[in-house]
Image (tube, grey):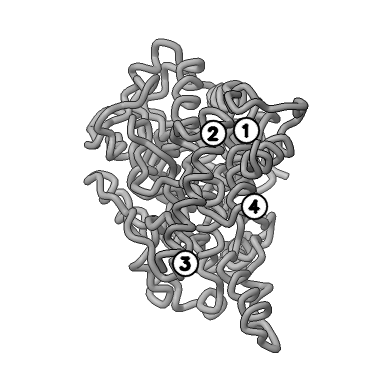
Amino acid sequence: MASSEGRRVVVTGQGAVTSIGVSAPAMWASMREGRCGVGPLSGMSMDDLYIHIAGQIRDFDPRERCGHSKPLMLAERYSQFAGSAAIEAMSQAGYNGPVPNGHRAASIIGSGIGGLGTIEKGYEDLFILKKKATHPLTLLRSIASSAAAHVSIEYGIKGPCFGTVSACSTAAHAIGLAYQMIKSGMIDMGVAGGSEASITYGSMRSWQAMRVLSPDGCYPFAKRRNGTVLSEGAGILVLEEFEHARERGAPILAELKGFGMTSDAADMVNPSIEGPTEAMRIALEDARLAPSDIDYINAHGTATTVNDVNETRAIKAVFGPHAYKLSVSSTKSMHGHCLGAGGGVEAVASIMAIRDGFAPPTIGLDEPGDECDLDYVPNEGRARHIAYAMSNSFAFGGLNAVLVFGPAPV
Amino acid sequence: MDEVADKIVAILKKNMKNPPDTVPMETKLADLEIESLDLAVIVFDIEDTFGIQIPYNANEEVQDFATVGSVVDRVKQIIAEKNAAGAAA
């Protein structure tokens, strides 16, 4: 094993599939313009549904995005999103076929739930339509490790390969684990992130039953916020050890400086202050940065009444007076809540924010909510110097994962 | 107490950690240590029991859910509306 002393982890590729763009540049262009991808829900029965909006992806053509790969063409929508984002990221990183040293590469791509659409279709076939058999690929399409497996097959990645599962922190956990593996010397590169395609009738009914969805829109930190909006997508990074990337002459987009993870160990839905606060502190410590070094936070910002106040309080606890100098935005206001893919999509946004020196907005923020008194970059994005950016993911169950990105090392 | 109130109190007690012997109508739900997720479960139980739909969003403070009595009144109102709609059809 290579010496782990002083190993740095850089981002050499990024890919995204979202309701505001099916590639990282397309998504970022939408974020710069403050475009919203939430629209009328379609493609399913509306029986007994009173939530009629979602961030569905309408312009994703699997043949165009991953048509060269027969396995991916046969895969579940969630794996196709992951495949598309991974191919985009790997192409940018300069990997256009099997990686040279497969055993020192990882594919860690999580999902909150995996191939939910496939599971529902299988149940419908069995229990309602009384068919004699489910589709033969039902199992392979369903399992929540299939996206990671597909990407490993696509690129001859023969080292660690698995999916993470931690609801809305899934992608951030995947990216954090790949980062730690590279740092420790276990691997030299990894494809990591999350993917989700769970806007199904059953899923909409389950979320509706929990009474946490907004019937009108995703308005993080706003007085009028009344719940989150489900969306789908994928966000994936190629992470690489710095010298490894430099020797290959790969483009270095950013450095992944730190990762912190904690669990509230308290409540399934109500977040604690301690869990998110400690996750941010640990990430800063890991990055060897002071709170005042951070310029931008891509907030978890779900637009539920509870999260947005709690996250604001936690940011103040970590950053003190510097909290008011930060730009803090929730890009969920534009792409909706991508659940297990959220941390990946938002990592891409954070890296783009550093690259362009531009804080993306929180749209729909007409009037801030009570106790929401930070600079949430309301409605219009803003140019500002961003050296270091933090991306927060705080999931149901109290599962917290925080990433800190910085500029490419020189 | 009437049947609707009895059933609602039974549902509330089922979802409480330490249910008291009696739950007066003027009791505030906040005083029953009922949190947002509990309330979603309670609303589901009430909907299931009475075959009705209750508009409720955990992100909004709703006056209908202030006290036990206000929940009972709202449920009775929804049942009456449902019956009236059924009669009209």
Q: Which residue is mark 2?
A: A402
Instruction: Answer left or right for A25 relative to A46.
Output: left
Residue A182 visible at all:
no
Same subunit: marks 3 and 2: yes
Instruction: Answer left or right for A277 relative to A364.
Output: right
Q: Which residue is mark 1?
A: A261
Mark 4 belongs to chain: B
Instruction: Name the amino acid, label 2.
Output: Val
Q: CA distance from mark 4 to mark 1?
A: 42 Å
Secondary element at image label 3:
loop
Q: CA distance from mark 4 to mark 3?
A: 20 Å
Circles 4 and 1, Cβ within 8 Å, touching? The answer is no
Q: Nearer the viewer, mark 1 or mark 3?
A: 3
Mark 1 belongs to chain: A
Q: Extreme bottom residue here?
A: A132
Circles 4 and 3, Cβ within 8 Å, touching? The answer is no
Position of residue A315 relative to residue A364, above or below, is: above
Instruction: Name the amino acid, label 4.
Output: Thr
Q: CA distance from mark 3 to mark 2?
A: 39 Å
Number of the label disc, if any, that sits on residue A105: none
Instruction: Name the amino acid, label 1.
Output: Met
Q: Which residue is mark 4?
A: B49
Number of the label disc, if any, that sits on residue A47: 3
Mark 3 belongs to chain: A
Name the residue rendered at 67%, 82% in the picture: A134
Circles 2 and 1, Cβ within 8 Å, touching? The answer is yes
Which residue is at the front of the view, A294 or A409?
A294
For marks 2 and 1, the one nearer the N-term is 1
Instruction: Name the amino acid, label 3.
Output: Asp
Residue A294: quarter of image: top left
